[in-house]
Image (cartoon, grey):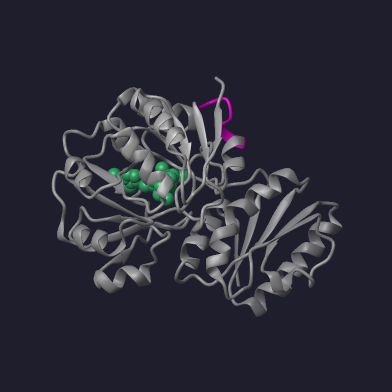
């Protein structure tokens, strides 16, 4: 299939292109589009065939449910059987934006979207291109991140091209995504709301409107408890080379990473480093280095983490040594993605 590629302004998107993309979606085609978090791979959320095509294009297991994207509050009432009080409070505070809520699903939502679950994930993105596209389609858009299953999520149209060119109908290029990690997934279908995936809206922000909110203990790969969001159980976000993640106080992480670098080099292996700006001049011998910004700027790390992981796929590295950051605020989302990219390979100091 020939994939149409269109560049759009994020502030004033060309209406003709939006209308064309909306028509493609309405008739069941697939369109990759930018959101404030990452690029999404959109299909018509009411068409089972279209939803199946999404799973196929991504190579994603069909038990891993999709998020339905909406562009007006009224669309939530079509998709939810009921909207719990916790969901109302959360969306009032954070929609449109990088928050996905899980609520009981209505009969309108195909079971292919929810992977057979009786709950549905709904998000109202703040990206103008995303909003206009949903309005033009006139239906909720089912959209996972627009990467091949298991690969780092795409934060630019070129990353989408890398994975999906030739597999989908259209790519809308709206530039780089301003947040860089996916939305927070908040389960509101239970008595006490639970964060199933940390993301753009932080735990700290959510506690301000939902003081009782909890973090799912199943986040990290290798956690004793199985994660409740089906997607969180897979190794994920992974570049081709194995990632070894170093967590702990920077004063202990730095010498440990330096020592490991020396050991790997002695074995004749080519090493990639993912480290903060401040450390770039402190290590030598690495084949490729990606910086995630200043150590004290987790927002910047969120912006860069996926592009950095993808960068290493273009470098001849045998292993990637990654520096962890503080597990708080948006840093919690960054660490969750890095831990998943690393699988079980974590050095805790
Ligand atoms: O920022 C985002 O959320 C991006 C953009 C495109 O909107 N989308 C995204 O979708 O990250 P995806 O499919 O890569 O991740 C959706 C996550 C998965 O971990 C999935 O298991 C979980 O949400 N999820 C979806 N429906 C669920 C449900 N009914 N119950 C529990 N978890 C659910
Ligand atoms: Mg994804």
Position of the N terminus by quadrant: top right
Q: Residue at x 62, y 41 (%)?
A: 158
User: Is residue 230 visible in the rendered structure shown here?
Assistant: no
- Point out residue 319 in the picture as x, y percentages from the top left corner: 72, 52
**Is residue 165 magenta-colored?**
yes
**Is residue 5 magenta-colored?**
no
Does 203 sit left or right of 335 as displayed?
left
Please tell me whether residue 127 is drawn above or below residue 296 in the rendered image. above
Does 316 sit left or right of 100 as displayed?
right
Q: Residue at x 38, y 54 (%)?
A: 126
Q: Which residues are magenta?
A: 162-168
Position of the C terminus by quadrant: bottom right
Does 108 sit left or right of 269 as displayed?
left
- Point out residue 156 in the picture as x, y percentages from the top left corner: 57, 46
User: Total of numbered circles in the picture?
Assistant: 0
- Point out residue 322 in the picture as x, y percentages from the top left corner: 65, 61
- Point out residue 146 in the picture as x, y percentages from the top left corner: 49, 39
User: Is residue 48 visible in the rendered structure shown here?
Assistant: yes
Q: Residue at x 42, y 59 (%)?
A: 199
Please tell me whether residue 157 is drawn above or below residue 5 in the rendered image. below
From this viewpoint, which residue is outermost toward the top?
A: 1
Q: Camera-side residue: 136 or 116?
A: 136
Please tell me whether residue 188 is drawn above or below residue 209 in the rendered image. above
């Amino acid at each position: 299939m020939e994939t149409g590629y269109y560049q759009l302004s994020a502030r004033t998107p060309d209406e003709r292109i939006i209308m064309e993309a909306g028509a493609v979606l309405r008739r069941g085609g697939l369109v990759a589009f930018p959101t404030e978090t990452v690029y999404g791979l959109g299909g018509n959320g009411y068409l089972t065939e279209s939803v199946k095509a999404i799973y196929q294009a991504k190579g994603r297991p069909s038990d891993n449910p999709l998020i339905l994207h909406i562009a007006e509050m009224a669309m939530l009432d079509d998709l939810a059987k009921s909207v719990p009080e916790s969901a109302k409070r959360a969306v009032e505070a954070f929609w449109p934006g990088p928050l996905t809520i899980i609520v009981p699903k209505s009969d309108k939502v195909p079971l292919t979207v929810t992977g057979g679950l009786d709950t549905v994930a709904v998000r109202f993105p703040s990206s103008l291109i995303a909003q206009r596209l949903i309005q033009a389609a006139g239906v909720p858009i089912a959209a996972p991140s627009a990467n091949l299953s298991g690969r780092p999520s795409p934060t630019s149209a070129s990353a989408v091209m890398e994975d999906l060119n030739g597999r989908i109908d259209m790519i809308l290029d709206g530039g780089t995504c301003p947040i860089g990690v996916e939305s927070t997934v908040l389960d509101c279908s239970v008595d006490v709301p639970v964060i199933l995936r940390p993301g753009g809206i932080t735990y700290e922000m959510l506690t301000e409107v939902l003081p009782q909110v909890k973090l799912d203990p199943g986040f990290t790969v290798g956690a004793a408890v199985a994660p409740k969001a089906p997607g969180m159980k897979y190794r994920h976000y992974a570049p081709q080379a194995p990632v070894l993640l170093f967590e702990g106080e920077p004063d202990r992480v730095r010498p440990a990473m330096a020592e490991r670098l020396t050991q790997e080099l002695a074995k004749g292996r080519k090493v990639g480093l993912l480290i903060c700006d401040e450390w770039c001049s402190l290590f030598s011998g690495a084949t490729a280095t990606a910086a995630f910004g200043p150590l004290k700027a987790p927002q910047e790390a969120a912006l860069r983490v996926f592009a950095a992981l993808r960068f290493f796929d273009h470098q001849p590295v045998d292993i990637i040594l990654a520096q962890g950051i503080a597990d708080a605020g948006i840093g919690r989302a960054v660490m969750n993605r890095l831990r998943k990219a690393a699988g079980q390979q974590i050095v805790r100091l």
